[in-house]
């Protein structure tokens, strides 16, 4: 989806192709959880995506909130 497009009420997104940068990942998962709402993101990976996992995993660790 292009930047700036907002769909209200999206609670789950699925990344069928692995984002290659943290900026791409944040942009994609930002479609969920807008305006203080919670959302879920599922990202499918292959062995070809392994070089990109660590930076994105670090971003995920920093963003996790425990209730």
Image: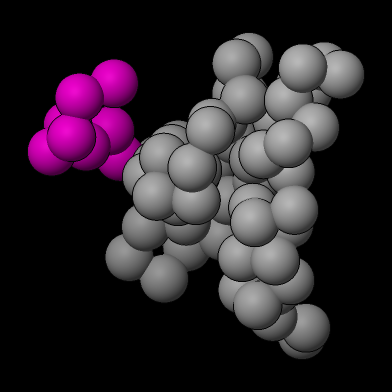
Is 25 situated left or right of 60 in this image? left
Where residue 51 sits, quadrant-wise, is top right
Quadrant location of the N terminus in the rendered image: top left
Is 47 situated left or right of 33 in this image? right
For the rendered model, the colour scheme is: one colour
Is 36 situated left or right of 62 in this image? left
Residue extending farthest to the right is 47
- The magenta region covers 1-8
Residue 11 horizontal/vertical position (percent): 54, 41
Q: Residue at x 63, y 14 (%)?
A: 16
- Front in this rendered view, residue 34 or 41: 41
Residue 42 seen by the camera: no
Instruction: State whether residue 56 is above or below residue 64.
Output: above
Q: Is residue 29 magenta?
A: no
Numbered circles on residues, count: 0
Residue 43 horizontal/vertical position (percent): 70, 30
Where residue 48 sits, quadrant-wise, is top right
Where residue 15 sits, quadrant-wise, is top right
Q: Main secondary structure of the magenta part?
A: loop
- Front in this rendered view, residue 47 or 13: 47
Instruction: State whether residue 43 is above or below residue 30.
Output: above
Instruction: State whether residue 40 is above or below residue 58.
Output: above
Q: Is residue 6 magenta?
A: yes
Q: Residue at x 28, y 33 (%)?
A: 7
């Amino acid at each position: 989806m292009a930047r700036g497009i907002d769909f209200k009420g999206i609670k789950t997104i699925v990344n069928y192709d692995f984002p290659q940068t943290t900026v791409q990942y944040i942009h994609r998962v930002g479609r969920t959880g807008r305006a203080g709402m919670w959302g879920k993101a599922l990202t499918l990976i292959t062995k070809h995506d392994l070089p990109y996992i660590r930076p994105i995993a670090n971003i995920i660790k920093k963003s996790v909130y425990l209730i």
